[in-house]
Amino acid sequence: MMKRYALFALLVFASPASAVQGRSGDQATQTISPVPSFTPVTNERLLNSDAEPENWLHYSGNYFSQRYSLLDQIN
């Protein structure tokens, strides 16, 4: 029974080490993608969320939780 636990522990601790060892060559070929630009959500934007119907800034659409979209067309 103790041998089974020792074998399991060996497999658990050895498998991540071998996975990291095999991936070391991949780092040279990776490209870094640019970070997309965004506008931070401020308290002012949340208060005036009706002015931006294309951005659903609240969980329920607005502070009143109406869940109504002001968009003319929804696809």
Image: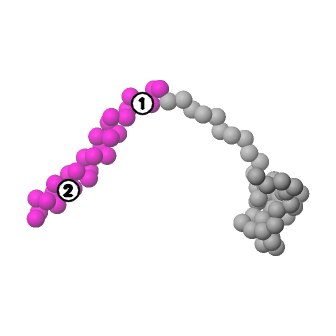
| Secondary structure mainly formed by the magenta segment | helix
Mark drawn on residue 8: 2
| First in residue order: circle 1 vs circle 2 | 2
Percent across and percent down for residue 47 are: 85, 64
Q: Nearer the viewer, residue 19 or 75?
A: 75
Q: Residue furthest top?
A: 29
Q: Residue at x 32, y 36 (%)?
A: 21
Whether residue 72 is visible here, answered yes or no, is yes
Q: Are marks 1 and 2 in contact (CB under 8 Å)?
A: no
Label 1: how many Cα within 10 Å (few below 14, some 14–19, many 20+): few
Q: Is residue 57 left or right of residue 20?
A: right
Where, by quadrant of the figure, is residue 61 drawn?
A: bottom right
Task: Using the image, tell me which numbered label, if any, was put on residue 40.
Answer: none
- Under mark 1, the amino acid is Asp
How many residues crowd around disc 2 within 10 Å: few (fewer than 14), some, or many (20 or more)?
Answer: few
Q: Residue at x 77, y 48 (%)?
A: 39
Horizontal arrangement in the rendering, residue 24 relative to residue 40 (left or right): left
Give the image location of residue 65, x and y in percent. Answer: 78, 72
Against 45, residue 64 (above or below) is: below
The type of residue carrying mark 2 is Phe
Q: Which residues are magenta?
A: 1-29
Image mark for residue 26: 1
Nearer to us in this view, 75 or 3:
75
Label 1 to label 2, Cα distance in Å? 29 Å
